[in-house]
């Protein structure tokens, strides 16, 4: 067994590595990571700002150690801290918070009594626009920071994973003792693109460096794990969906994938099946009812006819056939007694052309909530807050199931008859069960559509206490599954693409070595071809984009590189600066939403217009102006003039061209002409985007 006993972590790490604090700080000279106050003392001789714990040797030592480690000088003149005691480890964890009241910058550090640091946050102010720090400089700063705060053992067993490009660089390091990844040993660092400083460091809450990691000797093979896992039947074949915003409805696609709801791991030594930690994946919840704020304006017209209008008469007629609040409440009471109804509030709401009763019943501290379709009488939600989290009596499964089925049939009969039940218990870490749940998943063509369900819950005593329905009535595409390849062929195809991965995981018994399946989510269509898990479209493996091969010497090379470093790029090998940009590339470059159609490209913000294979300068101005200015303003060309340019501006584009000129997005050529009919090249688009982000 490999074992490392760690004490005096952090400042102790530096001593273990034979590196003094000044030497460690010198590693930051290039990136200027901790040179905020060069004219002030780097380390204060006394601990200031601490009152309650000033005599506490441990706290004083930790504060001093942290200030030395991160170069927190006396310019940070405000300080406070909080602390928590971890009963399991016996360690106290401190949250130190410094602030420089002159600059507004802050530093927050979480450190435990063993000097293990799991969090560092450096607040920066006053920066905007595009950063100038490169990815290579950010990686160097992250590496240097990491070597300062973790032991050499971690550095020797780490796998670097480059993060995304945005206003900050994300750098992820995954601990891999014995060459095997440990997911709970992940550390992430964010580096500012403006200063090159590490502004965020997140490590596991529990120190991953002082754990016994099982040595991978005499473990079962991946092929054996494959065979054993096949017997677990954990491959699912279900409908998944995505929403089509053009057609206003859900499109479903059948997919084979590793099920979240059955075993997905095998112990690498014994082949024992282990239940997933992520067995509650369905999204229980929906959008809250949206209410428009009503604005009442006193009628000032001289017309004194106060008889009912046609609209008022129609509204009354519409409600003639809907349930009253009393009738809606009675539907619930047939299945669930509500003894005290002295304090009831009810509100009739209209959503999507239908009416719903929102009913609250209060009795002292007891509260019951119901949401009922006033037209059909369907009970969509029920919740009783009289919760019981502990019971000496273990409720009977069959009795709860019978209740769940009876309530489901009574509240939502048409939906309920097209579902299949799933059961689970909710327990604390101590093992005490505090609730039970039956989730009735919708089935279509004989397979599950997990995004739709009827959810029923019971408290620790087995009393029914909540009911929830989530259902899509706007399904516009439902492919058949009669020609699916079947589970056996899907298993073989799946493991060609996604063989089991050997990894360490943390359990209540310690770290275990397991084969994990579906480590990266893989979906196969009904024919066994790999598809995207969220849209069902053919899957293409993407390599990390590393820049263009044809921009050296281009007049906009610097701009293109700076945009790329800040996460703005067209993902292809050649940038082609002198070729016209397509609407799709323009959308990708500017991070705009749009879609290719048979008529042409359509941008979400300009839904009524289709763009051809290229974009003119007029059209680019139209797209950018639509992001910043209300459409009503842009539809009135009279409010602008063409005085900004020497050439005549097309009347229909006057407002857009003026907006882009005023905001600094697009200027004219050297002779002062806009040239609206000219095609926008990729290089010109880069300059426009640069102006758009920095103006």
Image: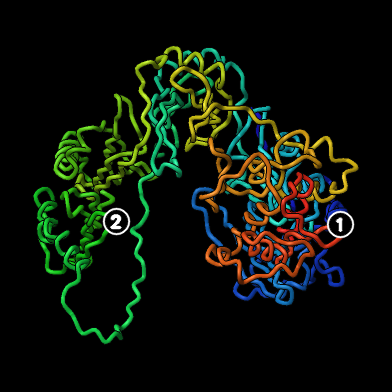
- Residue at the extreme right: 553
Q: Vertical placement of 216 versus 353: above or below?
A: above
Q: Residue at x 41, y 39 (%)?
A: 281
Local packing at callout 2 (Cα closer than 10 Å; few below 14, some 14-19, many 20+) is few
Q: CA distance from mark 1 to mark 2?
A: 65 Å
**Camera-nearest residue between 428 and 249:** 249
Image coordinates of residue 7 in percent, x first then y, are 68, 47
Q: Vertical placement of 59 versus 448: above or below?
A: below
Q: How many marks?
A: 2
Give the quadrant of the C terminus: bottom right
Taking the image as shown, residue 354 lies to the left or right of residue 73, namely left
Image coordinates of residue 429 in percent, x first then y, are 40, 44
Residue 136 visible in the current orientation: yes
> Secondary structure under badge 2?
strand
- Disc 2 target residue: 351
Q: Is disc 1 in contact with disc 2, using a CB cutoff of under 8 Å?
A: no
Taking the image as shown, residue 7 lies to the left or right of residue 468, namely right
Residue 144 visible in the current orientation: no
Taking the image as shown, residue 320 lies to the left or right of residue 36, namely left
Image coordinates of residue 330 in percent, x first then y, are 9, 55
Image coordinates of residue 392 in percent, x first then y, are 22, 45
Local packing at callout 1 (Cα closer than 10 Å; few below 14, some 14-19, many 20+) is few
Q: Residue at x 64, y 43 (%)?
A: 583
Q: Vertical placement of 186 versus 686: above or below?
A: above
Give the quadrant of the N terminus: top right
**Camera-nearest residue between 241 and 311:** 311
**Camera-nearest residue between 315 and 104:** 315
> Secondary structure under badge 1?
helix
Colouring of the image: rainbow
- Disc 1 target residue: 22
């Amino acid at each position: 067994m490999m074992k490392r006993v760690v004490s005096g972590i952090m400042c102790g790490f530096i001593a273990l590595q034979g590196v003094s604090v000044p030497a460690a700080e010198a590693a930051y000279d290039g990136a200027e990571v901790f040179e905020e106050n060069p004219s002030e003392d780097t380390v204060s001789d006394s601990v200031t700002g601490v009152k309650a714990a000033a005599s506490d040797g441990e706290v004083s030592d930790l504060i001093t150690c942290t200030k030395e480690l991160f170069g927190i000088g006396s310019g940070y003149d405000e300080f406070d801290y909080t602390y928590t005691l971890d009963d399991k480890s016996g360690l106290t964890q401190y949250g130190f918070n410094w602030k420089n009241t002159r600059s507004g910058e802050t530093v927050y550090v979480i450190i435990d009594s063993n000097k293990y640091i799991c969090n560092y946050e450096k607040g920066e102010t006053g920066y905007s626009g595009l950063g100038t720090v490169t990815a290579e400089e950010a990686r160097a700063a992250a590496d240097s920071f990491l070597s300062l705060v973790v032991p050499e053992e971690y550095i020797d067993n780490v796998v670097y994973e480059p993060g995304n490009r945005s206003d900050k660089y994300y750098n992820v390091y995954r601990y891999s003792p014995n060459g095997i990844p440990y997911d709970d040993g992940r550390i992430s660092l964010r580096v500012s693109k403006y200063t090159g400083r590490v502004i965020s460091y997140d490590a596991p809450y529990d120190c991953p460096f002082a754990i016994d990691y099982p040595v991978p000797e005499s473990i079962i093979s991946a092929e054996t794990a494959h065979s054993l896992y096949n017997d677990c039947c954990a491959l699912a074949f279900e409908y998944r969906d995505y929403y089509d915003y053009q057609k206003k409805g859900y499109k479903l696609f059948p997919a084979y994938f590793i099920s979240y709801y059955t075993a997905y791991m095998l112990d690498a030594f014994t082949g024992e099946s282990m239940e997933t930690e992520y067995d509650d994946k369905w999204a229980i919840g929906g959008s809250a009812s949206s209410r428009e704020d009503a604005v009442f304006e006193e009628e000032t017209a001289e017309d004194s006819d106060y008889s009912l209008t046609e609209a008022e008469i129609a509204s009354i007629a519409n409600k003639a056939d809907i349930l009253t609040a009393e009738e809606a409440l009675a539907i619930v009471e047939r299945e669930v007694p509500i003894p005290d109804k002295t304090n009831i509030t009810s509100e009739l709401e209209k959503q999507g052309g239908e009416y719903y009763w929102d009913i609250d019943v209060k009795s002292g501290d007891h509260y019951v909530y119901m949401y009922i379709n006033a037209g059909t009488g369907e009970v969509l939600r029920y919740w009783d807050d009289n919760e019981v989290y502990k019971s000496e009596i273990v409720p009977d499964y069959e009795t709860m199931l019978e209740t769940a089925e009876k309530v489901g049939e009574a509240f939502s009969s048409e939906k309920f008859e097209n579902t299949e039940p799933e059961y689970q218990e909710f327990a604390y870490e101590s093992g005490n069960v505090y609730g039970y749940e039956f989730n009735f998943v919708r089935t279509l063509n004989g397979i599950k559509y997990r995004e739709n369900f009827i959810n029923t819950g019971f408290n620790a005593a087995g009393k029914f206490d909540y009911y929830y329905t989530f259902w899509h009535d706007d399904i516009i595409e439902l492919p058949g599954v009669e020609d699916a390849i079947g589970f056996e062929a899907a298993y073989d195809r799946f493991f060609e693409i996604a063989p089991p991965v050997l990894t360490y995981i943390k359990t209540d018994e310690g770290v275990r070595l397991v084969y994990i399946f579906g480590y990266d989510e893989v979906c196969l269509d009904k024919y066994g071809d790999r598809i995207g898990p969220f849209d069902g479209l053919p899957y293409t493996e993407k390599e990390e984009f590393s820049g263009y091969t044809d921009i050296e010497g281009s007049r906009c090379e610097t701009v293109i590189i700076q945009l790329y470093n800040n996460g703005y790029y067209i993902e292809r090998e050649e940038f082609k600066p002198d070729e016209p940009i397509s609407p799709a590339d323009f959308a990708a470059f500017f991070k705009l939403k749009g879609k290719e159609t048979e008529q042409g490209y359509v941008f979400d913000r300009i839904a009524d217009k289709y763009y051809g294979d290229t974009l003119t300068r007029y059209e680019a101005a139209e797209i950018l102006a639509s992001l910043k200015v209300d459409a009503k303003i842009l539809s009135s060309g009279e409010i602008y003039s063409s005085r900004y340019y020497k050439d005549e501006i097309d009347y229909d584009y006057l407002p857009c061209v003026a907006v882009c000129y005023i905001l600094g997005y697009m200027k004219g050529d050297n002779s002062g002409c806009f040239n609206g009919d000219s095609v926008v090249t990729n290089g010109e688009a880069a300059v426009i985007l640069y102006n758009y982000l920095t103006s």
